[in-house]
Amino acid sequence: MISSYVPILVLFVFAGLFAGAFLGISALLGPKKKSHAGDSIYECGPAPVGGARERFSVKFFLVAILFILFDIEVVFLFPWAILFRQFVNEGMGLFVFVEMAVFLVILVLGYIFVWRKRALDWR
Amino acid sequence: MITIHHYLILSALLFTLGLLGAVLRKNILIVLMSIEVMMNAINLTFIAVSRYLRVMDGHVVAFFVMAVAAAEAAIGLAIVVSLFRTRQTIKTTDWRMMRG
Amino acid sequence: MSETIFFYIFAVISVGMVLLMIFQTNPIVSALYLVFGFFGVAGLYVLLSAPFVAVLQVLVYAGAIMVLFLFVLMLLNLRKEDLVYDRLNWRKIGVGGVAILFLGFLAHHFTRIQIQPFFDLPENFGTPEGVGRLLFTTYLIPFELVSILLLVAIIGAVVLGKRQ
């Protein structure tokens, strides 16, 4: 039972080994020459003004937040998709279908709200 | 031999660590992450008990807790971002004007 | 036997990563530690024969929620002077003592629980089929309520995020 997870363990071990190996190789073989001019920000000759890490506009985070919420919806859809045929064979198909339809209609209401508020516009 | 007590004490430990992080840290993002850790500890308790009672109800509850955690993270981060826009800080003690 | 070894490995990973997460100054580093902590908890779910919840743990917590955290952290783009430095003081030591007492209280009550373990699990224990069957029949009302929760969260996020 536990032994059926061995491939996943092997995957993780290999992923860790590869990541570590490549980081290690580039640290060993890469050039380590550090110069003050090389590390500074390139600004066509004149001395740089301010830092390179300017603040981004935070408005794009709304897309990420909405992604999470709809992601959870998909997670609930996943076992439903697996089980739907079994439920149909047991004669409960309509019931389960209506159940998921109600779930989705409520979330589509949210999607319509997002659409009407223009929350997904990249402006 | 791993008994249910191992899992229960481990989840109590994780819950306490999350609680400490949520209470002691002043960085609002670490506070939110600590709350996620606390929810994880609760999930671990549910899964452990349902394993040893041989019922799957705990798995369903863990499912719901995950949905609540995602909604909480989404709204919490939205609040953090909109407060950061106006106050330019992520320190919880700088947000005293939220008192009613 | 291997179960014992794996339990301690995953327990050390999850507790250690959560500890590292709490004591970081930079929230980006602590978010990365927490991803590993969630992986450790997912391993514990696998040991507890809950593969579906373990996969969801990786997908939802490590994959979605922590990515959202990192996304917001990168967008906020905290400078060095924005970082919050927490110093140790007597109040915190006191809170830590209370937390240890709380942990002892929990452990004391947890060790008294007597559950006869079942070793022969049903065939579909913890699989998507088994969990989903319960979710769509017994837990029908909570399932529908989750959609209302998500709807409220969507509306809240849009209202908070679109305010200019």
Image: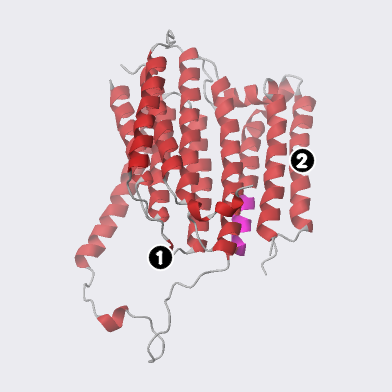
Relative to A16, C149 lies left or right? right
Three-letter amino acid code of the residue under disc 2: Ile
Q: What is the x, y in percent for residue A7?
A: 37, 36
Residue A96 visible: yes
- Is residue C52 left or right of A7 when viewed as pictured? right
Reading the image, the residue beneath label 1 is C81
* Residue C58 in sight here: no
Mark nearer the viewer, 1 or 2: 1
Q: Is residue C104 above or below residue A22?
A: above
User: Could you say where residue C14 lies in the image, as x and y percent from the top left?
Assistant: 36, 36
Please, is residue A42 above or below residue A87 in the view? below
Camera-side residue: A57 or B87?
B87
Task: Say if A103 sits above or below B11 in the image.
Answer: below
The subunit carrying tag 1 is C
Which numbered circle lies on residue A106? Answer: 2
Of residue B41 and residue B59, the one placed in the foreground of this image is B41
The answer to if A62 sits in the magenta stretch is yes
Residue A119 tag number? none
Secondary structure of residue under mark 2 = helix
Amino acid type at image mark 1? Glu
Residue A113: where, in percent of width, then height? 77, 52
Quarter of the image where one finds residue B80: bottom right
Residue at 72% across, 43% down: C151
Q: Is residue A16 left or right of residue A81?
A: left
Quarter occupied by the C terminus of chain A? bottom right
Q: Is residue C157 above or below residue B43?
A: below
Residues in magenta, as a range: A59-67
Does the magenta portion include A20? no
Residue visible at 78% across and 25% down in the picture: A95
